[in-house]
Image (cartoon, rainbow, N blue to C red):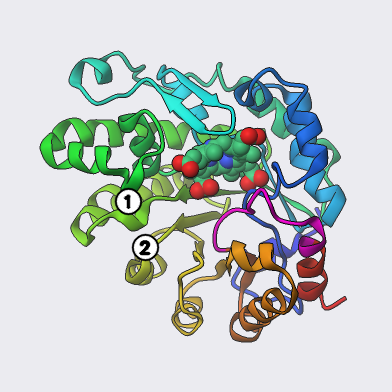
Amino acid sequence: MDETALQRVFRGESNARPPIWLMRQAGRYLPEYRALRAKAASFLDLCYDPELAAEATLQPIRRFGFDAAILFSDILVAPDALGAKVWFEDGEGPRLAPIATAEAFAALRREIDLARLAPIFETIRRVKAVLPREIALLGFCGAPWTVASYMVAGRGAPDQAPARLLAYRDPSLFRALIERLVQASIRYLCAQIEAGVDAVQIFDSWAGVLPSAEFRKWCFAPLNDIVAGVKARWPQTPIIAFPRGANQHLDEVARSSGADVVGLDTSVDLGFAAGLQRLKPVQGNLDPLALLAGGAALDRGTDDILDRLGGGPLIFNLGHGVLPQTPIAHVEQLVRRVRRS
Ligand code: 1CP
């Protein structure tokens, strides 16, 4: 098989030009995505329709020629397949029936229902069948802490306060929820790999709101459990950890988590990142607002990352997702600059 530029990074090698993909590279900033989205009754219907989801996955590849495609789906399909009721309010975001009591937890499935997620595995097979071999296909899941924070609150909540409170007030219930999600994540990621993804990313978008001791319990330990579970079955498949806002804990993640690549959010200092890169390949971390702003700010932000991290194993990315207002011309400018073309 042809080697992808990402594979070289996973092995710890650098590329003359780092490979690039962007978190949330599919989505509302693309007119072709908005047209596709209009064909599905709801966002979840889009995620569960292999034809439409494969098309959404491929759209940013066709337009920008990124080095990786990421499966078009959402982190909240996992709680959906655990029996939590999930829906998306248009223009607002996710909603779930809250899991904040022992009774609600008891109503969840013990094991994730992979049959419910069958359309997602079909999406992976369809994308894989047409994706050029030099482009990697990434699968993903949400990390247990981040997914649990939506399950407990029933929606995105400022500072994820409801889940943090539950973890303090009823740690045994919260631990049971996290453990359920660890097992679900292992099975879900293994099934994505079996369907054909080349690597997986674990999104811990809300890792940054926790005090250190809580981070170790609810983010670091579950990450390691998932990595160990997936590696036991698929030792060769690379895993990217993205604990957003983990700051100084990134050192621990680079040093002693089993993840192959450390994803850096926008706030990570590039000097600190260069130190991490001596331990593990890194991914990141351009400010999505610099991409939105464009012009000299975008070029400066891009060059800083290339200058400080481009000599080592780097996957160029944003420090969080593409914002819906982002002009397409700015994404083109970024890709040209990273490729120096
Ligand atoms: O079309 C629409 O209106 C829905 C917008 C949308 C999209 C395009 C949502 C709702 N999810 C997605 C796709 C998505 N979500 C992908 C696809 C692949 C890609 O192109 O990157 C991925 C990887 C995700 C992951 C995801 N969903 C995360 C982790 C990454 C992050 O952004 O922090 C989280 C936290 C979610 C929850 C979610 N789904 C959607 C929204 C609006 C949210 C965030 C809600 C909040 O702000 O709390």
Q: CA distance from mark 1 to mark 2?
A: 9 Å
**Label 1, residues with CA under 10 Å away: few <14, some 14-19, many ≥20:** many
Q: Would the CB of label 1 be found within 8 Å of ligand 1?
A: no
- Whether the residues at callouts 1 and 2 have beta carbons within 8 Å, the answer is yes
Query: In the picture provided, is 114 more to the left or to the right than 70?
Result: left
Magenta stretch secondary structure, dominant: loop
Magenta segment: 319-331
**Label 2, residues with CA under 10 Å away: few <14, some 14-19, many ≥20:** many
The mark that comes first in sequence, 1 or 2, is 1
Name the residue that disc number 1 marks.
219
Residue 329 lies in the magenta-colored region: yes
Query: In the picture provided, is 6 more to the left or to the right than 284?
Result: right
Q: Secondary structure at mark 1?
A: helix
Q: Secondary structure at mark 2?
A: loop
Amino acid tagged 1:
Cys
At horizontal 51% and vertical 80% (from top left) the residue drawn is: 270
Image quarter of residue 14: bottom right
Image quarter of residue 158: top left
At horizontal 68% and vertical 51% (from top left) the residue drawn is: 325
Name the residue that disc number 2 marks.
246
Q: Of 225 and 178, which appears nearest the observer?
A: 178
At horizontal 21% and vertical 15% (from top left) the residue drawn is: 103
Can you tell me which quadrant of the image ligand 1 is in?
top right
Q: Residue furthest toward the left? A: 169
Q: Is residue 128 visible?
A: no
Residue 61 lies in the magenta-colored region: no
Q: Position of residue 79 (x, y in %)?
A: 43, 26
Q: Position of residue 60 (x, y in %)?
A: 79, 48
